[in-house]
Image (cartoon, helix red, strand yellow):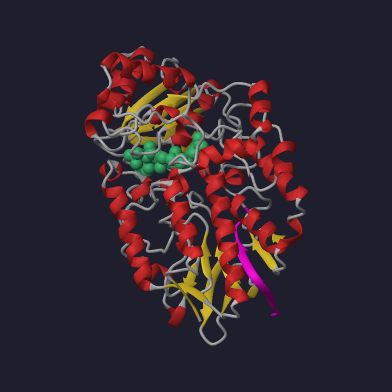
Amino acid sequence: MSTHQFDVIVVGAGFSGMYLLHLLRGRGLKVRVLERGSDVGGTWYWNRYPGARCDVESMEYSYQFSEELQQDWDWSERYAPQPEILRYAGHVADRFDLRRDIQFETNVSAATYQDDTARWRIETAEGEVYDTKFFIMATGCLSSTNKPQFKGANSFTGPVYHTGSWPHEPVDFTGKRVAVIGTGSSAIQCIPQIAAQAAHLTVFQRTANYAVPARNGALDPELRDAIKANYPEFRAKAKQVRNGLHYPLNDVATMSVSPEERQAEYQFRWDRGGISFAGAFNDLLLSAEANEVAADFVRGKIRETVNDPKVAELLCPKSVIGCKRLCVDIDYFETYNRPNVTLVDISEAPVEEFTPAGVKAHGEVADVDAIVLATGFDAMTGSLLGVDIRGRDGQTLKDKWAAGPCTYLGLSTAGFPNFFMVTGPGSPSVLTNMLPSIEQHVEWISDLLHATLARGAQAVEPEAQAEEAWVEHVNALAGRTLYPTCNSWYLGANVPGKPRVFMPYLGFPTYVAKCDEVARNGYSGFVFS
Ligand code: N01
């Protein structure tokens, strides 16, 4: 078997892998991207469930590294639907001729650092072997599906779908009885669509979730043109905001204004639509009192919307708002007024089992023709640990991260030279607009690779001390907030047995400043050998 030689192997052809390829190839490196899907797009390639769309507004959810590209592309709606985002990914691949260096339908199974040559040996499930100097996992934060092991799972006679690995062929629920398990972002998007098509929909809810209306619609051409006329300024402004988004953050504490002013601010954002609701005041996730006021506003809206008071109460979340990702919905709560929708509360007693006919909870079987698992992802670490990655002296990443992920800047980990992650644990990633975060990471990693080569170094890796300090810093930031108070996937709490560690870094501008400082200081915290 021949071994293919490269300067850089990138795993994943989503937005991270595509930009890495474009940038590193442009810097003269021999790059190959290995991708398990049959085309580009990453998370948007797999999440094809009905109603899938981005909750970041389309004018912000795109690359900015090429002015021609951002001028060239036109979005049709305020929030882009999944097929349009996938078309955009394809457009980028065509425009920069990326596919010639991407190998599709290739599943990376193992990656081993060779101590003697300071190179990585990458193996695929298809039996191919690659030899590379640098190895970059660009596998995304939400790519490894969480499929709970329900008792009797195989006994159900109908199809079982997962929102995160939806079939490529259209799924028609017309006349069918369907069960959806889960009420996170994916469920909140697909439930209204499935309910509109199916004969009956039964939703199994373990934890009620907050959702704010999207107020989606055709993109206003005047707004689009105004943004395009000043795109760099628009992007620069967004980068100064802690989540990298352009929406207005009201830098005022909740309790510093009168109850009337508070209601008016919440109402303004409710009417405006989207996650800017979370920016109504500056202490949503810092003060329990402030949080409760905002939560109560949303609960009031749910009670106003849902006709049956008992159902409305079940749909009212009790936890901290924003602690789990705030969902953005189109007709979600209204859907529970439909006569063909039933909500089953499984907060006290879980799904007992799948039977040949359906889903059993509270001793009763809901007879269905199809089951949709909207049960989320083994987020942030799932895809990284899904590959058998072995660093210096054969240490596995799995062993190193047994008590939780440890990284330096969310991009690298000690003991694994010449290995990088894009949007890894310890980076702001999922708490920001992903596209600008990805571009910042890719450009920063690319500069570091360049610096390593320019020094004639064989390898670069973070110092253990720098990594420890970073992990402490990430935890300290989270510890000052309400984020650790709920069972979110940010904490790994959604996957049984996963270490409970808050994974994302809080604050895009501070993160970027820290990365810039590290680079300016000759990559402080890294060792070149
Ligand atoms: O997954 P989730 P998701 N029995 O983990 C339930 C991004 N995203 O795919 O809350 C019964 O949020 C679980 O219950 P609980 C976005 O970042 C973005 O919806 O753990 N139920 C929960 O209700 C988002 O946050 C967009 O008690 C079980 C649900 O399944 C992230 O992806 C759209 C269960 C999982 O919710 C993940 O969202 C979609 C069990 N054994 C997604 N296990 C947009 O851009 C889990 N659940 C709009």
In the picture provided, is 427 more to the left or to the right than 23?
left
Residue 471, quarter of the rendered image: bottom left
Residue 84 spot, x, y in % from top left: 66, 35
In the picture provided, is 108 more to the left or to the right than 299?
right
**In the rendered view of the protein, which quadrant contains the N terminus?**
bottom right
In the picture provided, is 228 more to the left or to the right than 323?
right
As drawn, the residue found furthest toward the bottom would be 116
Nearest the eye: 513 or 179: 513
- Taking the magenta stretch, the answer to whether it contains residue 438 is no
Nearest the eye: 58 or 206: 58
**Ligand 1 shown in quarter:** top left
**Residue 443 visible to the viewer:** yes
Q: Which residue is located at x 61 percent, y 36 percent?
A: 82
**Residue 48 visible to the viewer:** no
- Taking the magenta stretch, the answer to whether it contains residue 5 is yes
Residue 453 spot, x, y in % from top left: 62, 75
Q: Which residues are magenta?
A: 1-13
